[in-house]
């Protein structure tokens, strides 16, 4: 999937000409509708029908569009609807438009041309990047037809790419994680892409080796694969063992780089059910092993501050965090973010200042600006803070008090309500206002090879929000959650980065949120101290009188 063809590009241009919001195929993701289904679909193989003798032009176009559900053999069934001299010209992998089946309108135009009006829900670009749209109706897609020598109608011109309705898309395509490293080579960072489940191993490996990180992560991750090393066309995976044939330049790569390449490739292909990966050159296996990486998992227990103390809560009993619990209780903070090494924590003190506390110590104030939000802490122990009224004034402060000004933070935002660092330190998620419009946004964190940050990248808008205030958090490496309240209602939004979202009611008065290791296990704290855990579409109260629901940023 190398080239974004005319299919998606034509639709983008048509929407722009109509004065509607565009359907982006690169750059920041724009707000779009929500899909209230699980984004992981079972493997389903559709085998569409070939054209029938005597089919009308309308039946040919409808059959061709329907045949997009069958990617087997490079969409061999869909190509049967095309004229012989056009079959190898059409590029189905140029992109995808996800539309509403019931709103398609097929009509005739002069000169044996049929046009198809669609209402787009999302697009997927040639690299597998998913971007929701605003559901605008675009100008029609055109299909030229001609009668062949045998009298049968076939398509002689069609836009590149394919059209799938929402249900078919979630069956034919699946999200996969392309794994890159953070700049320190400590963490693997997932970059979500959407590909057909057919030949998924080849598509995922190609995106990693021959492709590049998405716009969101372009300045925030690195790859071990040198630019001159290429993946050859196919990655067979007999018995779950993927065989990735690389170009001969891989023979000159040093062992450390080879091991990192193996690590990235194995982790990426694991999302396609591959259990083992062999990198080959001319059929000979390269000697490479996976390197150890830092975990982004956290303790599954709730970490809370109550009248009984600070620690992990299980069945009403607290287990203290060694060296920290007593100091945190004494500080009586309004918010706590526990560092990955569990040897320090960022605090929002009762007077609104941001501080850090380390094992056996007392809180040290790092930021005394007014109106500060709950702080967040990154893998290097840097504490990030920002005043709610000044979204661009993001600051990272080292435990020794050294301040690092962060450039490029939330351009155009008029207010920020919450922000939190991903556990691998490569992305920041936030709830911000653009004028009167609250939105859930994410930006890449720009760092040097030592992990020292300098900027936030161009933010991507994940979803438009309704409600007041809000809390935001990372539920796992690829999913964020947010809670907002408005009057007598509260809303919980779950959003996959580069994927689908869902919305449900949240407990009334929800003011805090903490992810664990799976999106389905998120915890929410209400203003009255009630603690809830998500159970499918319901919230179950598990504790009361919780003063602070702390955020965990990993484990040693």
Image (cartoon, rainbow, N blue to C red):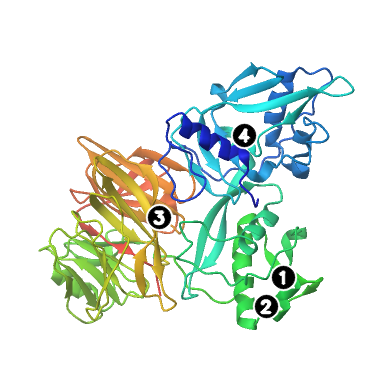
Determine the secondary structure under disc 2.
Answer: loop
Real-space Cα separation, disc 4 to disc 1, in angstroms: 35 Å
Q: Earlier in the sequence, mark 2 or mark 4?
A: 4
Q: Residues within 10 Å of mark 3 (few under 14, many from 20)?
A: many
| Of pointers 4 and 1, the one earlier in the residue sequence | 4
Image disc number at residue 288? 2
Residue in view at x 61 percent, y 75 percent: 290
Crowd band around label 2 with a 10 angstrom C-alpha radius: few (<14), some (14–19), many (20+): some
Mark 3 → mark 1, Cα distance in angstroms = 33 Å
Contact between labelled residues 2 and 1, with CB atoms less than 8 Å apart? yes
Identify the mark at residue 475; answer none if there is no mark: 3
Label whose residue precedes the other's in the sequence (3 or 4): 4
Of pointers 3 and 1, the one earlier in the residue sequence: 1
Q: Earlier in the sequence, mark 1 or mark 2?
A: 1
**Is 140 drawn above or below residue 386 in the view shown?**
above
The residue where tag 1 is placed is: 279
- Which residue is nearer to you in this view: 222 or 302? 222
Q: Which one is closest to the eye, mark 3 or mark 1?
A: 1
Give how far apart the Cα atoms at labels 2 and 4 are: 41 Å
| Image quarter in which the C terminus is found | bottom left
Neighbor class of circle 1 (other Cα within 10 Å; few <14, some 14-19, many 20+) is: many
Relative to 155, say whether 362 is above or below: below
Residue at 24 percent of width and 40 percent of height: 436
Task: Judge from the rendering whether residue 189 lies leftward or rightward of residue 203; answer left or right.
Answer: left
Callout in the foreground (4, 1)? 4
Tag 4 residue: 163
């Amino acid at each position: 999937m190398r080239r974004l063809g005319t299919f998606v590009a034509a639709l983008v241009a048509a929407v722009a000409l109509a004065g509607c919001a565009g359907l982006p195929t690169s750059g920041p993701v724009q707000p779009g509708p929500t899909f209230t289904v699980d984004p992981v679909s079972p493997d389903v193989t559709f085998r569409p029908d070939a054209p029938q003798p005597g089919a009308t032009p309308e039946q040919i176009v409808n059959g061709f569009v329907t045949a997009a559900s069958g990617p087997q053999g490079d969409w061999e069934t869909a190509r049967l609807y095309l004229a012989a001299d056009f079959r190898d010209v059409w590029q189905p992998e140029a992109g995808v438009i996800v539309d509403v089946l019931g709103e398609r309108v097929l009509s005739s135009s002069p000169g044996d041309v049929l046009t198809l009006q669609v209402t787009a829900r999302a697009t997927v670009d040639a690299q597998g990047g998913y971007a929701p749209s605003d559901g605008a109706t675009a100008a029609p897609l055109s299909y030229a037809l001609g009668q062949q020598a045998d009298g049968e109608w076939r398509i002689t011109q069609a836009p590149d790419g394919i059209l799938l309705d929402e249900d078919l898309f979630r069956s034919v395509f699946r999200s996969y994680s392309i794994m890159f490293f953070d700049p320190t080579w400590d963490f693997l960072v997932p970059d979500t892409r959407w590909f057909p489940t057919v030949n998924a191993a080849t598509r995922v490996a190609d995106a990693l080796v021959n492709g590049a990180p998405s716009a969101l992560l372009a300045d925030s991750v690195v790859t071990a694969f040198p630019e001159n090393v290429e993946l050859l066309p196919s990655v067979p995976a007999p018995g779950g063992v993927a065989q990735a044939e690389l170009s001969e330049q891989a023979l000159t790569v040093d062992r450390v780089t080879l091991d990192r390449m193996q690590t990235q490739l194995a982790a990426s292909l694991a999302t396609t059910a591959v259990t083992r990966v062999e990198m080959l050159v001319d059929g000979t296996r390269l000697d490479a092993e996976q390197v150890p990486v830092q975990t982004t998992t956290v303790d599954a227990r709730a970490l809370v501050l109550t009248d009984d103390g600070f620690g992990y809560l299980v069945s009403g009993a607290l287990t203290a965090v060694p060296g920290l619990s007593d100091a945190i209780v004494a500080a009586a903070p309004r918010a706590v973010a526990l560092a990955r090494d569990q040897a320090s924590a960022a605090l929002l003190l009762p007077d609104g200042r941001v501080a850090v506390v380390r094992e056996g110590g007392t809180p040290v104030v790092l930021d005394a600006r007014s109106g500060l939000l709950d702080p967040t802490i990154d893998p290097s122990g840097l504490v990030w803070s920002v005043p709610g009224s000044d979204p661009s004034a993001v600051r990272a402060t080292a435990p020794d008090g050294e301040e690092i000004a962060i450039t490029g933070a939330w351009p155009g935002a008029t207010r920020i309500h919450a922000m939190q660092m991903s556990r691998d330190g490569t992305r920041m998620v936030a709830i911000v206002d653009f004028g009167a419009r609250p939105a859930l946004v994410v930006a890449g964190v720009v760092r040097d090879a030592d992990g020292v940050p300098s900027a936030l990248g161009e933010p991507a808008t994940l979803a438009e929000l309704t409600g007041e205030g809000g809390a935001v958090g990372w539920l796992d490496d690829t999913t964020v959650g947010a809670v907002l309240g408005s009057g007598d209602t509260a809303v919980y939004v779950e959003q996959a980065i580069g994927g689908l979202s869902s919305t449900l009611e949240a407990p009334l008065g929800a003011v805090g949120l903490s992810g664990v290791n799976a999106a389905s296990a998120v915890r929410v704290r209400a203003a009255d101290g009630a603690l809830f855990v998500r159970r499918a579409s319901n919230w179950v109260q598990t504790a009361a009188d919780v003063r602070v629901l702390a955020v965990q940023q990993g484990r040693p």
